[in-house]
Amino acid sequence: MAQKVSDAKNISLKALVDKGRNRVIFVEADNDFIDVLFSFLTIPMGKIFRLARDHSTPLEIGCMNKLYQSIEKLDVQVFRSTECRDMLLLPHSAANCDCKNLKLKIIDDAKPKLFKCPPSRVPHSSRFIGYYSNYRCPVCSDTMDSEAFILEGDSQVGGVFVKERTRVMITDDLQVIPPVSADNISLFTKLGATNGNTTEELTFSIEVEQVVNLLVSSFVSKTPFTETLLKPNPVPKLGGVNFSEGKCIESLMSGASIDEKKENISVRLTVSKSKNVVCYAQVREDFVNLIFSFLTLPLGFILKQMLDSPWKGCIDQLCKSALDFDEQFFKSNYHKELLCNPKLFPGFSYENNLLGIEEAVYHYSDGKLIADGSINKSSVKVNFVDPKFHGDKDRKARGFLKAPAIFTVTDNLDVRPVSSIFQLSVLNDLKVHITDIEDRTVHVGKNEALRLLVASVVSDSILTNAFLRKSKEPSVKQEQ
């Protein structure tokens, strides 16, 4: 397994291994591997599920799997267009143009085709961008049929996110540590790295397959390097975590509105009185738009919302490492922001998005779109025509789904068009008698939306945990 690397499609990693426990203590890596590791934070959740499936690597994260499968199973007529469904199943990354230069690319996104008005037609031709050549310009109402291109990161300049020749230590639980640190001696002792009789140095050849395994393992294991390099095993699922243990947002069960009255989403829960669990919810398309949008979110955004929540794995350590990483090692503030404040690709948000995530901003400069506006101070900010309007005559619609529509959503996020037969089937499966149920109405604002997001990642019972469970008192006191 240990070998030298000569192929350009490989990255060489030196690892210090505990021979007795057959466990990786830490690895040493340069900027090529650091960039690959940090790029995990920019990948949308929907793309992570597709990536794991394409590599035959099982991945179960809370209720996210069921959510992804629901989108696949729903009739395409439920969506405003086929493109809207594809935006959820195969979302673009806002860092795609930079990640093209990774030495190992686990995601090889095709660049989306973008269009604008020809420069010869109108002076504002570079200020409005559409995803389809038959779009009408919002200003001149003419067809946007001139292709626009996004400028990719410069492959001749070393590094993608961090500077060339940057070197770090990475512990088995994904803590990224600069090698020159006064704390390293105590860290070596803590990790058991000081006894030369029980440790050995190995060099590994890392390919795309190992990188995917490392990503998947980091969701469910505290030792992803060991699992990937020394003893590859089937990956367990991430679910059943005690949701109440994290610093989670308190649920509002009274149904009273919070500050964002205009944005609140109404949800009717059907609850088992004896078990105190949500059997299912009857909801409008606005709630389904919200939970479906979880799959468009970059991993780094999700992790930032739950840095104090419980994890079976250690992927949260990667997020913390990026946030704490010394600024001098990043190529620029723009590259740091890509990791520490990841955004949606333009067009993937919608008007009633309660999660507070922004879309990436692009500028037009020298005939191309650029993501880093600081490159050219005279560049012009562009606006993207919402791609969800494609093929939909209803210009008042919001989100990915046609409106109006009613859905049944189970506690583990099985989403289906409303059906009494399905609702009765759910009650039978849960062994809940119809006399044991009651309806409760709750409202979802920004706080509840974030709580739903966190629950969908760490829990198998998102609606119960988001609306019926309360955080333990000690966790609440710690926040004060």
Image: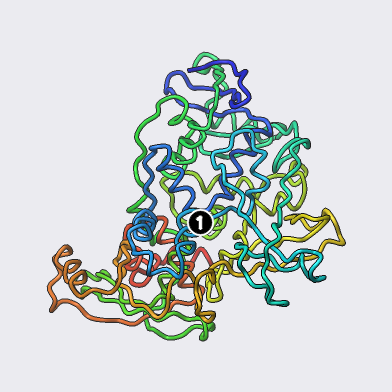
* 259 on left or right of 435: right
Out of 474 and 343, give the one closest to the viewer. Answer: 343
| Residue sticking out furthest to the top | 197
Q: How is the image coloured?
A: rainbow
* 430 on left or right of 99: left
From the top left corner, tell me how far across and down residue 368 is, in percent. 77, 54
Asked if 424 appears above or below 63 in the picture, the reply is below
| Residue 37 in view here | yes
Q: Quadrant of residue 220?
A: top left
Asked if 279 appears above or below 15 in the picture, the reply is below
Asked if 358 appears above or below 139 in the picture, the reply is above
Image quarter hosting the C terminus: bottom right
From the top left corner, tell me how far across and down residue 250 is, in percent. 44, 72
Q: Residue at x 71, y 49 (%)?
A: 335
Neighbor class of circle 1 (other Cα within 10 Å; few <14, some 14-19, many 20+) is some
Q: How many marks?
A: 1
Q: Residue at x 20, y 75 (%)?
A: 420
Q: Residue at x 59, y 50 (%)?
A: 42
Q: Residue at x 30, y 71 (%)?
A: 417
Tag 1 residue: 308
Give, as a three-letter code, the residue at label 1.
Asp
Element type at mark 1:
loop
Q: Quadrant of residue 358?
A: bottom right
| Residue 480 in view here | no
From the top left corner, tell me how far across and down residue 475 is, in percent. 45, 63
From the top left corner, tell me how far across and down residue 258 is, in percent. 49, 83
Out of 280 and 239, give the one closest to the viewer. Answer: 280
